[in-house]
Image: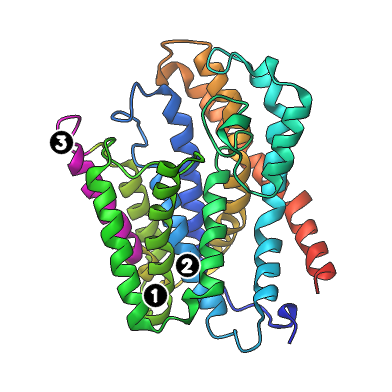
Amino acid sequence: MNNNELGTKPHYQILDGLRGVAAIFVVLFHLAEPLSSSHLDNVVNHGYLAVDFFFLLSGFVMGYAYDDRWGQLTIGGFFRRRFERLQPLVVLGMTLGAIGFYFTDSTIWPLIHTVPGWKLIVVMLIGWTVLPIPLSMDIRGWQEMHPLNSVGWSLFFEYVANILYALGLRKLPNKALACFVFLAGALLLHFALTNPNGDVTGGWTLNAEHLRVGITRTLFPFFAGLLLSRVARPTRIKHAFLGCGLLVAVVLLMPRIGGAEHLWMNGLYEALCIIVIFPLIVYLGASGVVHGQMEGKICKFLGDLSYPLYMTHYVLVYFYVAWVSNHKGITLGQAWPHALLTFSGAIVLAYASLKLYDEPIRAFLRKKLK
């Protein structure tokens, strides 16, 4: 049977909504980040953990959507579906980043105007593939594998997880998968406790250290989500969206744990969030009952917006970061109008990207790849 004849299973509406909530906190984190003096005092201190939450959600949804379909679905069909879902916004995000690149010349990126046009185009074309660029091709100066759209690193590791799932790990029985997840969790915990930064950040540079971090951050949540989709038996929980949404907010807004003196305490907190709290949130969200049409519409809107928002917001954040860097010492009280404008613009850009680009392109690809 052709992969496009498999149909689409019903969505977990509350999980869709929670994905949107997490995407909003990613934007808030990136807006607060340039105003902090260090990694110890960001107002949205743990906002980057939303990426780990995305990985867990992705593994859960992957298991739900595909685990019982491999008798009808080929590996090629699986990757065509993933390409159709992920790649259009990868291309758009990199293209928009290239269009705005020269306009972000600032004190934080003083050499942007020296980058030749041909090099910008080459970096953009490589970015379209989501493959990382070597450090020699870094055109912004942040040593990122995707300097035109900072968040592209997580899509690279999302593809890595998808490949591992499709080519072998999906075949693991639950006990073997549980052992794999346990070992991945132990690896994550060790990293969180020993990382000199006292957190789980990293993964965005093409070198051995960041590749190790990226794999460590991906393996546990993605395959824990897959395992959860197999063994969890959702019940019916009232007010799950509100409760889970608030829990996501509390986790990501929690002030730094332990300060500069006890960095391991913050690492332990973040590891526990990923290993314990995030799976609990996903289970509760999967068990949740949507109350009324309004909550259903909110969850659908947030779910539809989540991926476009994640993949396009940093295009505007580059302008915001450049503005902040040109106004040294600016405070949150002074910067909030620009932050609000950037946030609002990110929402508008994401919705426009969804309706004018992503949905039409995906419909076109669905037809052509059938």
Residue 13 lies, with reference to residue 337, above or below; the image says below
* Nearer-N-terminus badge (1/3): 1
Q: Residue at x 70, y 43 (%)?
A: 126
- Residue 254 pos. (x, y %): 28, 42
- Badge 3: how crowded within 10 Å, few (<14), some, or many (20+)? few
**From this viewpoint, is residue 113 visible?**
yes
Q: Residue at x 43, y 54 (%)?
A: 215
Residue 137 lies, with reference to residue 330, above or below; the image says below
Camera-side residue of 290 and 148:
148
- Residue 67 pos. (x, y %): 52, 81
Magenta stretch in the rendered image: 257-279
Q: Quadrant of residue 125?
A: top right
Q: Where residue 262 is drawn, which disc sits there? A: 3
- Badge 2: how crowded within 10 Å, few (<14), some, or many (20+)? many
Specify the amino acid type for callout 3.
His
Asked if disc 2 and disc 1 are in contact, CB closer than 8 Å, the reply is: yes
Camera-side residue of 316 and 108:
108
The residues tagged by marks 2 and 1 sit, at their Cα atoms, a distance apart of 8 Å
The residues tagged by marks 3 and 2 sit, at their Cα atoms, a distance apart of 32 Å
Q: Where residue 59 is drawn, which disc sits there? A: 2
